[in-house]
Structure formats: structure tokens, C-alpha cells
Image (cartoon, helix red, strand yellow):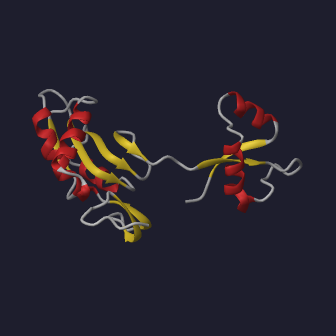
Amino acid sequence: MEADEGCVHIFQQGDFTLHSGGKSFWKINCDALSNGDWATLAKVISKRCHFSGVVGIPSGGLKLAGQLQKYCQAGYPVLIVDDVLTTGNSMEEARKYYPDAIGFVVFARGKCPDWVTPLFALAKEVGWVRLAEDQNLPHNPFDARKNYEESERRNAYNEGQQDMLKEGWRKVELGK
């Protein structure tokens, strides 16, 4: 991988301990976003919801909350914002003080609570596995990624999914 002199990358590889306490080989570093980036993200959010006040989750949501202040309108719920959601615990904790609040996050690494909307969400990794004819089990459950790649080559979308289902393939969530 090439080094970019003087660049701060939003997506980084390494051994990281996330704010949630979890471990990861990659992270989203929103410190790499400029004030102009935050202003653009705030405008996008303001077009998707109405709110009377903004609460930013420290420390990642504070810059976004600052940019959103100018879009506040009386008569709407409070908006709770954060830069990156992993478990949703920080958002849920803040909502204890604003039970009718709505939420927005820039990036969601994990599942968002129902009241939180992500601008960008990490999709679940799903694939197709072919079930053994007699046992209703994958031929080799440890080979799900290979099956996933095979299903991608088959381009199994829409009509193709129906064909795969007839042939004994099933969609499954793959490991992290």
C-alpha cells in the first residue's frame, strides 16, 4: 500500500480498540473530514429530517451538531447525532435525556436502533450456500465465502435468485 504524505485517511487499517470497546482491524476516522465536509453532511441531514435542537455525542458528534444548529426549527423533536455508530450504546444513553428524540449518524458499522438513521451503513455480508440434498445443511459450512463468491459469479439477483432457490441455494449471513 502506498503512503500518502500529509494525508489523513478516513478509513484506516490496523489494530484498533473502538469507542465501544470492541476490537477491529479497521476504523473510520472522522477527524479526517474538513469543516466543509461536516457542513455538507449537515445540509444532507437537514433535508431528510426536521428538528428543534441538536445534541452531539462527544466527541465525534460535536462537529456535526455545530454545523446542524442553523437548521433548527421550533416544533420538532431534538436530533441526537454522532459520527460513527458501532453498538448504538452512546446514542441510547443520550436518548435517556431526550426520550422523543430522533437520531442520525454519518456512518453505521452496526445495526442502528429504530429511531436512528444512518447516512452510510456497512452492509451485512450475505452470501449463498448450497444445501446438502438430504440434510438441509451447507455442504461445508466453513466454505460459505467460497459459495458466496460462486454465487456472485452467477449474478443471482431478481430472477436469478428464484433459480438458485430451486437449485437448493439459501441466503445466509457470513461471519465478520
Q: Position of residue 25 (x, y in %)?
A: 45, 67
Q: Residue at x 20, y 33 (%)?
A: 77
Instruction: Please state if 146 lies on the left or on the right of 42 as rendered.
Output: right
Q: Position of residue 138 (x, y in %)?
A: 77, 53
Identify whether 70 is placed above or below 14.
Answer: above
Residue 81 position in % (x across, y down): 24, 46
Q: Residue at x 67, y 38 (%)?
A: 155
Give coordinates of residue 91: x percent, y percent. Answer: 29, 50
Q: Residue 24's image quarter? A: bottom left
Quarter of the image for residue 67 reads top left
Q: Residue furthest bottom?
A: 15
Which quarter of the rendering shows the N terminus? bottom left
Left or right, 34 with reference to 21: left
Q: Nearer the viewer, residue 116 or 39?
A: 39
- Tell me: 164 left or right of 27: right
Quadrant assignment, res 87? bottom left
Image quadrant occupied by the C terminus = bottom right
Q: Residue at x 72, y 43 (%)?
A: 170
